Image (cartoon, helix red, strand yellow):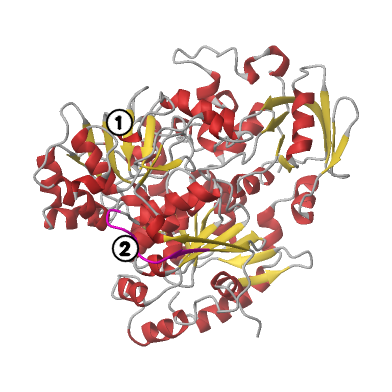
């Protein structure tokens, strides 16, 4: 048999039909659904008299719109249009008989945090969702990617997706990370190297000692941002850490089925002599704590660097960089660690898990945020929130001056009331620093949870290593 | 679905790289449960100021480009969020073709589901098309999907690649789901075998 990559193996195991022109139907094992990109798809089913083919493999949770303030049980805290979207999901979940975690459920949270947490996401699966950060689930060695609403409707109706196979890219992070360097710094540094279009047309498999050393949660952070590098999906081969994470989760297999699953999962790795269309190798020891300076996730620099000059770039990036600097209100040559911020956001599907909150709390313990700063922690799910309270992390955040919120996407995309005002500058653990992403005119600097916590204390972008 | 075969129309030049879907349609307009009506908010934050007045420097606010049916843009068009509201807004505005050196994967696929033809061409050819688009309203570009060509207002032609299946769906306005439903026997067979092999899924 010819050698295969992990992606090849998962692809082959899910190929339901291949047409003569190479167009394939890929079978979908898990379809995650949220309120923003699904109403038109369910409406399409109703209009055509179609139904959900596999409601048992379809899991819905509202996350993008929902308020994260403690008074959210009161529907009045939601804008009318948000409320309509959430109510539409309530109704669609009920009408079509799919698994559902409503706002009132303690397990509610960001769809990409709830899926793994509840054991819906397992190695070797195909996972899709009408959300680009579906890439997160690749951390389990599952082929996971975002789709549009028309494709959501297609998967609901047929449990398949029309696909052409992507190319294989290997991103190897060798050696050990230095202290203060995290999964977020790995994934941002990779995008800094490849650019936001570098992964277009590829499925990336992350490997190497530094990736193996990461926890499952760190691996989710790495895969989450594969889409920011343009890749269709990010993958990490499952190993003992993966199995341990999955074991005992509510929807993970049990008993003999667990053993059977495990036997198959252990075959899910790229063969030694597998063919790669592209290979990138980065020495883990060369990765520093990084931040973004511009309005693209590729605008990544070590915290010790200075704001770059637009003319230091080439081609179309010169104009884009100038536009970014103007939007961000930054001057070339300014040391990044002198850039003052007024808002801190810790949360999102990138960094809203318990280990992220632990990392931030470790920096904040016994300290206060800078006077006048607005800082919030938005746990990724109700269960993350509960665990953080049990571990005393919530008290650390509250004592430091952070707002302690309920679960949701919140200020990552600012569809709910958690938004930046024009000109406000935010240290954020989320995944996108696009113009207007966190609110019109808002300025976003992406970074790890520890870095965001450090920034909250000093009121400016800060090297977390100085606080460790 | 809306068909696409040929189009002769005004092309709006947007020589910016990494035009993301947050720019194309900001999140405050994702709170709809319909697909229609988003054209007025296309590129909203680049198009209007805080008081909802048009920003005159933005290309689609200029008289020459108000009726644009084509966008010529920089690299990596449509990156970011998977929101199909982006192609919905583009189509609702009246634009049915976007030409750029490259596209983000999800956006590219979403276009074909909405009667929009995304065309990827090498940067040198984009440079020529951008110059042509900058001529304004009297300069009309022609896009022919059948022959896979883009022709500038002064007759220079470039050929582009497009997946044969996607081309057929767009030209005939085919419904993907209907087409897949025709293969339901294959899906049934696959599903039965997969359930046997991986009963935990």
Report whether A315 appears left or right of A377.
Answer: right
Q: Position of residue A91 (x, y in %)?
A: 41, 48
Residue B133 vertical placement versus A450 (above, below)? above
Q: Residues within 10 Å of mark 1 (few under 14, many from 20)?
A: few
Quadrant occupied by the C terminus of chain B: bottom left
For mark 1, give the secondary structure. Answer: helix
Give the residue at mark 1.
A338
Q: Which mark is residue B13?
A: none
Please state the extent of the stretch shown in magenta in the rendering: A171-180
Instruction: Tell me the chain of label 1.
Output: A
Are the residues flagged by discs 1 and 2 from a single subunit? Answer: yes
Give the residue at mark 2.
A117
Q: Residues within 10 Å of mark 2 (few under 14, many from 20)?
A: many
Magenta region, mostly helix, strand or loop?
loop
How far is disc 1 from disc 2 in space, using C-alphas?
38 Å
Quadrant occupied by the N terminus of chain B: top right
Q: Is residue B107 visible?
A: yes
Q: Quadrant of residue A114?
A: bottom left
Instruction: Tell me the chain of label 2.
Output: A
Q: Position of residue A66 (x, y in %)?
A: 32, 41
Residue sitting nearer the eye, B122 or A150: B122
For mark 2, give the secondary structure. Answer: helix
- The nearer-to-camera label among 1 and 2 is 1
- Are discs 1 and 2 less than 8 Å apart at CB? no
Q: Position of residue A196 (x, y in %)?
A: 54, 45
Residue sitting nearer the eye, A378 or A5: A5
Q: Is residue A61 visible?
A: no
Residue sitting nearer the eye, A441 or B196: A441
Whichever of labels 1 and 2 marks the residue nearer the N terminus, that label is 2
């Amino acid at each position: 048999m010819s050698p295969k990559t992990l992606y090849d193996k998962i692809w082959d195991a899910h190929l339901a039909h291949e047409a003569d022109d190479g167009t394939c139907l890929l079978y979908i094992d898990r379809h995650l659904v949220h309120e923003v990109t699904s109403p038109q798809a369910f409406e399409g089913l109703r209009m055509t008299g179609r139904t959900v083919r596999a409601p048992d493999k379809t899991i819905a949770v509202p996350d993008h719109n929902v308020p994260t303030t403690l008074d959210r049980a009161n529907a009045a805290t939601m804008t009318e249009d948000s409320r309509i979207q959430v109510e539409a999901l309530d109704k669609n979940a009920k009408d079509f008989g799919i698994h559902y975690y409503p706002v009132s459920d303690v397990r509610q949270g960001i769809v990409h945090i709830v899926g793994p947490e509840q054991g819906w996401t397992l190695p070797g699966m195909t996972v899709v969702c009408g959300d680009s950060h579906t890439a997160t689930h690749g951390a389990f060695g599952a082929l996971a990617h975002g789709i549009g609403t028309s494709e959501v409707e297609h998967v609901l109706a047929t449990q398949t997706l029309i696909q052409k196979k992507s190319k294989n890219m290997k991103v190897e992070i060798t050696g050990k990370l230095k202290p203060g360097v995290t999964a977020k710094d790995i994934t941002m540094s990779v995008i800094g190297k490849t650019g936001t279009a570098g992964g277009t047309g590829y499925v990336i498999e992350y490997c190497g000692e530094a990736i193996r050393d990461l926890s499952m949660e760190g691996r989710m952070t790495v895969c989450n941002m594969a889409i920011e590098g343009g890749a269709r999906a990010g993958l990490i081969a499952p190993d003992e850490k993966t199995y341990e994470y999955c074991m005992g989760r509510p929807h993970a297999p049990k008993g003999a089925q667990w053993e059977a699953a495990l036997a198959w999962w252990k075959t899910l790795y790229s063969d030694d002599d597998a063919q790669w269309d592209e290979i990138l190798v980065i020495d883990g020891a060369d990765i520093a704590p990084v931040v973004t300076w511009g309005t693209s996730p590729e605008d990544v620099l070590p915290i010790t660097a200075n704001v770059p000059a637009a003319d230091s770039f080439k081609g179309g990036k010169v104009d884009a960089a100038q536009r970014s600097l103007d939007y961000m209100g930054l001057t070339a040559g300014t040391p990044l660690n002198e850039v003052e911020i007024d808002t801190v956001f810790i949360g999102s599907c990138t960094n809203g898990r318990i280990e992220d909150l632990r990392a931030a709390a470790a920096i904040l313990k016994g300290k206060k945020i800078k006077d006048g700063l607005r800082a919030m922690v938005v746990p990724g799910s109700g269960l993350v929130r509960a665990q953080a309270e049990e571990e005393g992390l919530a008290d650390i955040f509250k004592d430091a001056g952070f707002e302690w919120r309920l679960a949701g996407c919140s200020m990552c995309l600012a569809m709910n009331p958690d938004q930046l005002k024009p000109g406000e500058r935010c240290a954020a653990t989320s995944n996108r620093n696009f113009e207007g992403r966190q609110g019109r005119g808002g300025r976003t600097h992406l970074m790890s949870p520890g870095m965001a916590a450090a920034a909250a204390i000093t009121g400016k972008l800060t090297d977390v290593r100085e606080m460790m | 679905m809306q068909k696409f075969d040929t189009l002769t129309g005004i092309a709006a030049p947007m020589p910016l790289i990494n035009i993301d879907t947050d720019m194309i349609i900001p999140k405050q307009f994702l709170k709809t449960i319909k697909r229609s009506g988003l054209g007025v908010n296309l590129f909203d934050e680049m198009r209007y100021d805080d008081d909802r007045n048009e920003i005159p420097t933005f290309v689609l606010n200029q008289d020459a480009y108000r009726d644009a049916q084509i966008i010529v843009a920089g690299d990596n068009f449509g990156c970011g969020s998977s929101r199909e509201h982006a192609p919905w807004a583009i189509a609702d505005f009246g634009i049915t073709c976007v030409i750029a050196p490259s596209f983000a994967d999800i956006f590219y696929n979403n276009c074909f589901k909405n009667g929009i033809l995304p065309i990827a061409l090498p940067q040198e050819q984009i440079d020529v098309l951008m110059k042509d688009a900058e001529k304004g309203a009297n300069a009309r570009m022609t896009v022919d999907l059948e022959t896979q060509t883009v022709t500038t207002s002064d007759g220079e032609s470039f050929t582009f690649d497009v997946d044969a299946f996607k081309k057929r769906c767009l030209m005939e306005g085919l419904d993907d789901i209907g087409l897949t439903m025709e293969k339901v026997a294959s899906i049934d067979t696959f599903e039965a075998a997969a359930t046997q092999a991986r009963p935990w899924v």
